[in-house]
Image (cartoon, grey):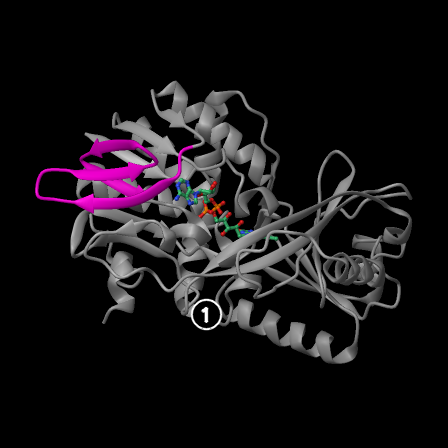
Amino acid sequence: MKVVVVGAGVIGASIADALADRGVSVTVLDMRGPARGATQASAGILAPYLEAHDHPALLDLTSRSLSLYPAFMEKLAAADVPVEFARTGTLEVALDDEEARRLQGMKAWLDARGVEAEWLDSSALGEREPTVHPSARGGLFIAAHGFVRARALVAALVAHAKMSGAIFEMPVEAASVESSRDAAVVRADDRRYEADAVVVAAGSWSKRVRVANVAALPMRPVRGQLVHLTWTDGELPRRVIWGPRCYAVPWSDRSLLVGATMEDVGFDEEPTVAGVQAMTTAASSLFPAAASARIEAIRVGLRPKLPDELPAIGRYARAPRVIAASGHYRNGVLLTPLTAALVSGLLVDGVEDPVLAQISPDRFER
Ligand SMILES: Cc1cc2nc3c(=O)[nH]c(=O)nc-3n(C[C@H](O)[C@H](O)[C@H](O)COP(=O)(O)OP(=O)(O)OC[C@H]3O[C@@H](n4cnc5c(N)ncnc54)[C@H](O)[C@@H]3O)c2cc1C
């Protein structure tokens, strides 16, 4: 079988790898290069119970994907590309009493679901995470969570996919996809790629890839700005810290990612003074030592958002050789192992996982 994947973000790269691993002949097209869309900005936090506690369908998807992560990372080790991946939990911090009450309510909710969670009062919090502002009222620790470095993850996926024969062609911008009884055809610039199936994993830009006979997905880009800090003053936070106005991810090189804004500004990927100010102010209110950190870089990305905040994964009924894999919004890195498994299961084994009915790309036409 021959498959063309449009997009080499974390979603396209993982699908290409999963297919190539199963013996499929894969060509990946990207208009920029691997991980040059939302993925390069991603904080890589793997935290279903923070991100999706109020969205049951998303919680099912994200917690299922998190459970696939250890085996997913283990398989990638063969590529010999180092990828930082840590299951050190998340600590959500309350800076006032109202937040503390909300987090205690959240702990009760997690307890009822059998998810391990620990409430730390202010002195326990100070011991567990001395970098957090001493006036914090307490924090909720969720052990199952973690993070992965998204760019390194894509580098490993690309290397691993190439080991199984996948071809990456870039820069190539796909303009349209047609699906007939016998084949699917991608048109890109003056080139034409014919395959048995085409996977459109073009993130926020997915609706710009025209699929014949199918309405464009109602995708909106949501800009996120994130500051990458180099810590200069004492100990770095020990795990992912989630505050009321920002989150922070500590990397082993003593840098800290602080994110992220949520902005509806179309396809504008430029950083702004207001965005950087919001993130640096939020970081300083959470960690006193952040004020003396160096700004290493500002990262900006466009999260691909669909109206119900669920991804679109699966075949189009009216173009069955075309498979959508986009709209992963705030949780694309977390949803990567599941997305790759669903698409490769569909194409290689012909397995329609029951969850695909809920996340079908056709649901917006109904
Ligand atoms: C600031 C920020 C923080 C985030 N933090 C987290 C987090 O902590 N945890 C988490 O799980 N998720 C997080 N996300 C979300 C996550 O990054 C995205 O959901 C994920 O990266 C989407 O991956 P993707 O491959 O679908 O899209 P992208 O990474 O955007 O990749 C799409 C690719 O398609 C290519 N492309 C587009 N159009 C075409 C075309 N016509 N032809 C060829 N190529 C094309 C682009 O060049 C790009 O490389 C964050 C996102 C942002 C912006």
Q: Which residue is mark 1?
A: 55
Q: Where does the N terminus fall, quadrant-wise?
A: top left
Q: Is residue 279 left or right of residue 345?
A: right
Would residue 223 appear left or right of 141 to someone viewing this image?
Answer: left
Residue at 53 percent across and 56 percent down: it is 267
Is 137 on the left or on the right of 305, as rendered?
A: right
Residue 178 drawn in magenta: yes
Q: Nearer the viewer, residue 213 or 108?
A: 213
Residue 158 position by quadrant:
top left
- Tell which of 267 and 111 is nearer to you: 267
| Count of number-bearing discs | 1
Residue 277, given in percent of the width and then of the height, sits at 79, 60
Q: Amino acid at mark 1?
A: His
Q: Is 123 a magenta residue?
A: no
Q: Quadrant of residue 167?
A: top left
Span of residues in magenta: 172-199
Please indicate, yes or no, whether residue 46 appears anywhere in the rendered image.
no
Q: If the image is split into quadrants, where does the C terminus sit?
A: bottom left
Residue 12 versus residue 139 in the image, above or below: above
What secondary structure is the magenta-colored segment mainly? strand
Residue at (90, 43) in percent of width and height: 234
Residue, far front: 190
Q: Where in the figure is residue 250, as x and y percent of width and height?
A: 72, 44
Q: Give the x, y percent position of residue 173.
A: 39, 38
* Residue drawn at point x = 29 percent, y = 68 percent: 364
Is any part of residue 187 visible from this angle? Answer: yes
Disc 1 crowd rating (10 Å Cα; few below 14, some 14-19, many 20+) is: few
SS for callout 1: loop
Apparent side of residue 8 relative to residue 240 in the rendered image (left or right): left
